[in-house]
Amino acid sequence: MTKLLKKQCENLNFAGIEFPMKSKDIDKFEKQHPEISVNALGYENKKIYPLRISKLNRKTACNLLLLEDKRYCLIKNLSRLLSCKSSKNTKRNFFA
C-alpha cells in the first residue's frame, strides 16, 4: 500500500465492519461514506466478471478485485486491467 493510500485510509470510518469485508459490509461502508461508491470484480478461470456494481453515482468510485483468499485489492487503473482481457485489436479501450 502506498503512503498516500495509507493516509487516505486514516480518514475512513470502518466502525461495525468486519474484515475480510463481505458484500453486506460494502453496503454499510457506502452508507458511512456518502462520497464513495464501491464496485467489486471477481477473477476466475482467466476471466474478470462483476460481483457487485454500486447503484450509487458518487464523486469517488472505488474498484476492488476479490482475490482467492477472500480479500480485496484496489484496482488503480480499471482500463488497464480490463483492456488486457478485451479484444486482440491494437486500439485502446477505456472503461469507467
Image: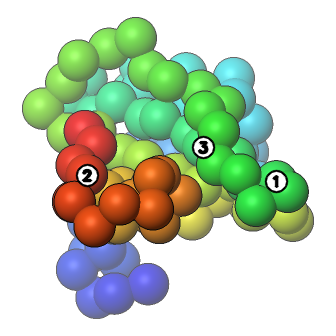
Furthest-left residue in this view: 59
Quarter of the figure with the C terminus: top left
Residue 85 placement (x, y as % from top left):
53, 58
Residue 60 placement (x, y as % from top left):
20, 39
- Disc 1, disc 3: CB below 8 Å? no
What's under tag 2, amino acid-wise?
Asn
> Going 44% across and 84% down the picture, which residue do you hit?
1
User: For numbered disc 2, what is the local secondary structure?
Assistant: loop
Q: Along the line of sight, which residue is nearer the eye, 86 or 29?
A: 86
Question: Quick check: can you spot residue 83?
Answer: yes
Instruction: Name the N-terminal-most of marks 1 and 2.
Output: 1
Instruction: Name the N-terminal-most of marks 3 and 2.
Output: 3
> Going 43% across and 35% down the picture, which residue do you hit?
38
Residue at numbered disc 1: 44
What's under tag 3, amino acid-wise?
Leu
Q: Along the line of sight, which residue is nearer the eye, 74 or 1?
A: 74
Q: Rounded to the nearest whole Å, what is the CA distance between mark 1 and mark 2?
A: 22 Å
User: Can you say whether 27 is above or below 93 in the image?
Assistant: above
What's under tag 1, amino acid-wise?
Glu
User: Can you say whether 86 is above or below 58 in the image?
Assistant: below
Residue at numbered disc 3: 41
> Going 28% across and 67% down the picture, which residue do you hit?
90
Closer to viewer: mark 3 or mark 2: 2
The picture quadrant where one finds residue 34 is top left
Task: Tell me if 69 is positioned left or right of 63 in this view.
Answer: right
Q: Which mark is residue 93?
A: 2
Residue 94 placement (x, y as % from top left):
22, 49
Task: Tell me if 69 is positioned left or right of 6 in this view.
Answer: right
* Few, some or many residues within 10 Å of mark 3 (<14, 14–19, 20+): some
Residue 58 placement (x, y as % from top left):
19, 24
* Few, some or many residues within 10 Å of mark 2 (<14, 14–19, 20+): few
User: For numbered disc 1, what is the local secondary structure?
Assistant: strand
